[in-house]
Image (spheres, helix red, strand yellow):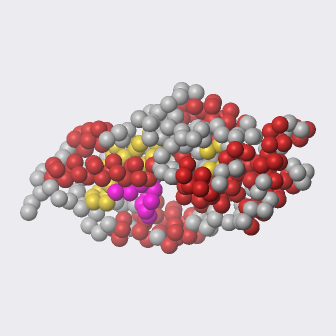
Amino acid sequence: MSRKPLPSRTDLAAWASELGFTGFGIATLDVAAAAQGLRDWLAGGFHGEMDYLERHASLRCEPQQLVPGALSAIMVALDYAPDDPEWVAAAWANLEDPHRAYVSRYALGRDYHRLVRLRLQKLAQRISAAVGDFGYRAFCDSAPVMEVDLARQAGIGWRGKHTLLLERARGSTFFLGALYTDLALPADNPVTEHCGNCRRCLEVCPTGAIIAPYRLDATRCISYLTIELAGSIPPELRPLIGNRIYGCDDCQLACPWNRWAQPAIGTDFAPRHGLEASELAELFAWTRAEFESRMAGSAIARIGHERWLRNIAVALGNAVTPGMAGPGHIRAIVALQQRINDPSPMVREHVDWALARHGGG
């Protein structure tokens, strides 16, 4: 059965917009240039314990292996910035309070993976209604897909020096989704880069993880250390983590383009459980059942309760107030002492380190 004529780009973009996507573009599935960069990065060991990146590298580098017959990628973006024009200043203020937890802004609300995929599924259904059955598969940061390079090719933005995608009208605070299809859609053109001589993202990184423009050493990145790393956080990096308990936004907060960040549409990414400015001691007291209940439907759930406690123990260890006599300091010590005999050896290790930072408690 022959297909009906393909929908126009204007129609596709309109359907994506109706679903809440604020960025749209089409790319071919030629990622050869980016593939070599990925292989070099992996060869340098910059991926750390993320062995799945190496294990599935061929699927990233050759998209047709992942989805046989795929010809085009429909790329979309979904904004997640807080609905507050002063959100950057508020984030910096949170980071400057050593007794409050900092959670990366993208993780304050519902888990984006499923939300983006569900909307892409609806987009695919809309296309199917117009052209008939076609082959497709939807992705959002959950499969070996080069989302950033494909979105760059599709003209949604350019790769910034911090390795994230940037767009002049919305900065970098958006999620990317990809719909691989077997439709021969006309590709868009990449946009020009606009980072210029700016090095703010490199200079602000707490751990120096952005070792050169467009080159990230994930093993030093706080997002890796607090999310991807399964075991103990290297002691030499713990003081640099500050109060960041899940991810890190410093490179985005410092980026001039994020003055144009667009707030999320709807309430899916609105903060839940007060995570935008919770006290570390309060979060450290959560039981496993409380963690699993409150983090259900959140990206944070993926790290589990043990890593949650590990991360907060480090942050409590960094909550050293001048003179070590303030009420925040006392709350930190008391909270840590409650976990001295935690069943997890990893948690106990980080608690001991944190108490040592407070003079042994």
Taking the spot 36% from the left edge, 68% from the top edge, the residue there is: 66
Labels in figure, total: 0
Q: Which range is magenta?
A: 138-149
Q: Quadrant of the N terminus?
A: bottom left
Is 259 part of what is drawn in magenta? no
- Report if residue 46 is visible in the image: no
Residue 243 spot, x, y in % from top left: 71, 45
Residue 40 lies in quadrant: bottom right
Q: Residue furthest top?
A: 85
Q: Farthest residue toward the left?
A: 1
Q: Is residue 40 among the parts visible in the rendering? A: yes
Task: Please check the rendered image and state whether residue 140 is part of the magenta-colored stretch, yes or no.
Answer: yes
Image location of residue 258, percent across then percent down: 54, 35
Q: On the rendered structure, is 243 left or right of 227?
A: right
Q: Residue at x 33, y 48 (%)?
A: 119
Name the residue at the bottom extreme: 55
Q: Position of residue 346 (x, y in %)?
A: 73, 65
Q: Nearer the viewer, residue 258 or 315?
A: 315
Q: Nearer the viewer, residue 112 or 68?
A: 112
Q: Position of residue 163 (x, y in %)?
A: 54, 50
Image point (77%, 49%), residue name: 335
Decide which of 131, 93 is in the foreground and name it: 93
- Residue shown at the point (31%, 60%) measured from the top left: 137
